[in-house]
Image (tube, coloured by chain):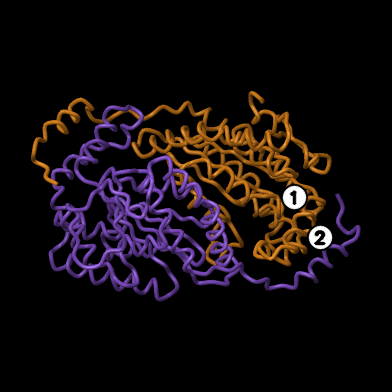
Chain colours: A purple, B orange
């Protein structure tokens, strides 16, 4: 439905999240059922390209790797997106990392220390459910570090990501954008359904009271770290079906950009076939 | 189609793999299309139970965890099984580990050291693509350790697994059983299709020449480590659709045995709803 959703959703410079309709569906012309069908239709190509990438990594024929990074306010659907998009590819080569409150050990290191350990290796598609951006989001809003340290981190993140891209990585950074009304609706659903209680934490309401502060922190982070090699994509996430389709499409476009070929044989297939045929009765039952 | 596939495929005491038809379909009455439909039909319950388990872990309401362990000769379909079964559940809470040739660091430790680090935590479903059994399989066939050490390992494995189960774990050990004819067919397919070259390694044929030695090593390992709390299931894997259905069914039966409930709220839902409703205009856009 669009030739390049990446270009359409990428953001550079200042952004105004309050002015962005969380229920809009840029790049998609259709309704819920169409969106679900369109997502499913992406599956085969997504699975094929991910397997090529994985094969290249296994064969040590490529340095390419992909990192899908998801950020967003509580209930923006990071987990749901991972379920919908992750289910389309083989679990092999999909490496999921969730970043919660840092441990004592993690706090004793630079904020990127725990991130570095979870970066995808050659052939892998890494998926980050939250990320190093927490350190300039809640880190800023809750003043978990000195202002100078927060300030330093924007540049450190940009440099870190640039290095990742320079060494063969592709970064797909998605901000799942919702507004307070969408969040209220989803928090209510969690509080009214006992099968969803586990997704709720009273602290979510405390953070919600700081909505404007978080929005500002996101706007600053996006402006400061949306670089040419690693731009941010703001994905309207008020409609789950659009969010899933959009993130899957962004991932697919990133994989397409790698021009992935199946790795060549590092052996002689004809000779191996002859060996297999010629084994005679050497192999018993 | 069967009330308990676990009981049907579990093995105790001596086994004779050469006498076991790799293309048989115990517990399933139907053909390929039926098997594929039956696998898909397991999806919703499998996903629901895995989410309950994951929720319990997240809420720190359970110590339960599951380990699906896959062993089998090259081409028996460990990766294919993981793709088919793993795709039915949410990537969250599914933790996949592949064990290849041990590193220098790993070799400097006991053979269970690297395994312990990858055991599933509360709420997780761990999946092992190969495992500690390699240390009594290739370890035995290739004499990678002294006979006394190999001998010691059977007991060490049984004790290790018993401890896992005693602390809330459930182990689903599957031996994907094929015969030399099935393997020849699948190796040939890899050698005749450039998109499958990456799955082939000339060393596979070297191992194939030791088929009988591996079969014996499997028979001994299964006999020595098929305990009451952690039995081995021998899954005929000559038909991929049956193998996928059988492993998914074994995993489902294991999850059912946990009687998983959604974790209770550790907050007052009504009070939280009142807080959400009462926030008035405090939260802006």
Of B156 and A113, the residue lying toward us:
A113
Image point (43%, 45%), residue name: A83
Mark 1 sits on what residue?
Answer: B217
Q: Quick check: A238 left or right of B79?
A: left
Estimate the x, y position of residue B160 in percent, counting from the top left. 55, 43
Estimate the x, y position of residue A276 in percent, counting from the top left. 82, 63
Image point (51%, 45%), residue name: B126
Q: On the image, which quarter does residue A160 sit in?
A: bottom left
Estimate the x, y position of residue B213 in percent, counting from the top left. 79, 54
Query: Which chain letter goes with mark 1?
Result: B
Q: Secondary structure at mark 2?
A: loop
Estimate the x, y position of residue A18 in percent, counting from the top left. 17, 52
Is residue B97 shown above or below B90? below
Q: Earlier in the sequence, mark 2 or mark 1?
A: 2
Query: Which chain letter goes with mark 2?
Result: B
Of A273 and A148, the residue lying toward us:
A273
Q: On the image, which quarter does residue A209 sit in?
A: top left
Mark 2 sits on what residue?
Answer: B209
Tell which residue pokes out farthest to the right in this image: A281
Image point (44%, 62%), residue name: A253
């Amino acid at each position: 439905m669009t030739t390049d959703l990446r270009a359409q959703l990428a953001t550079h410079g200042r952004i105004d999240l309050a002015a962005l309709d969380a229920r809009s569906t840029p790049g998609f012309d259709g309704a819920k059922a169409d969106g679900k069908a369109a997502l499913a239709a992406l599956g085969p190509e997504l699975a094929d390209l991910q397997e090529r990438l994985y094969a290249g990594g296994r064969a040590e024929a490529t340095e390419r790797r992909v990192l899908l990074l998801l950020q967003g306010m509580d209930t923006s659907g990071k987990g749901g997106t991972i379920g919908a998009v992750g289910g389309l590819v083989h679990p092999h080569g999909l490496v999921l990392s969730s970043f919660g409150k840092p441990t004592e050990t993690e706090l004793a290191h630079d904020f990127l220390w725990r991130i570095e350990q979870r970066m995808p290796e050659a052939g892998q598609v890494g998926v980050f459910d939250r990320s190093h951006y927490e350190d300039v989001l809640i880190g800023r809003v809750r003043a978990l570090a000195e202002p100078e340290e927060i300030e330093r981190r924007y540049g450190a993140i940009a440099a870190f990501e640039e290095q990742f891209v320079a060494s063969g990585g592709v970064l797909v950074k998605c901000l799942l954008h919702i507004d307070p009304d969408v969040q209220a609706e989803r928090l209510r659903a969690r509080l009214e359904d006992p099968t969803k209680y586990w997704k709720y934490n009273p602290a979510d309401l405390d953070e919600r009271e700081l909505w404007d502060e978080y929005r500002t922190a996101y706007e600053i982070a996006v402006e400061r770290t949306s670089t040419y090699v690693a731009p941010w994509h703001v994905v309207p996430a008020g409609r789950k079906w659009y969010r899933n389709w959009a993130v899957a499409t962004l991932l697919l476009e990133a994989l397409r950009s790698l021009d992935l070929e199946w790795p060549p044989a590092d052996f002689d297939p004809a000779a191996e076939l002859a060996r297999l045929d010629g084994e005679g009765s050497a192999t018993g039952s």
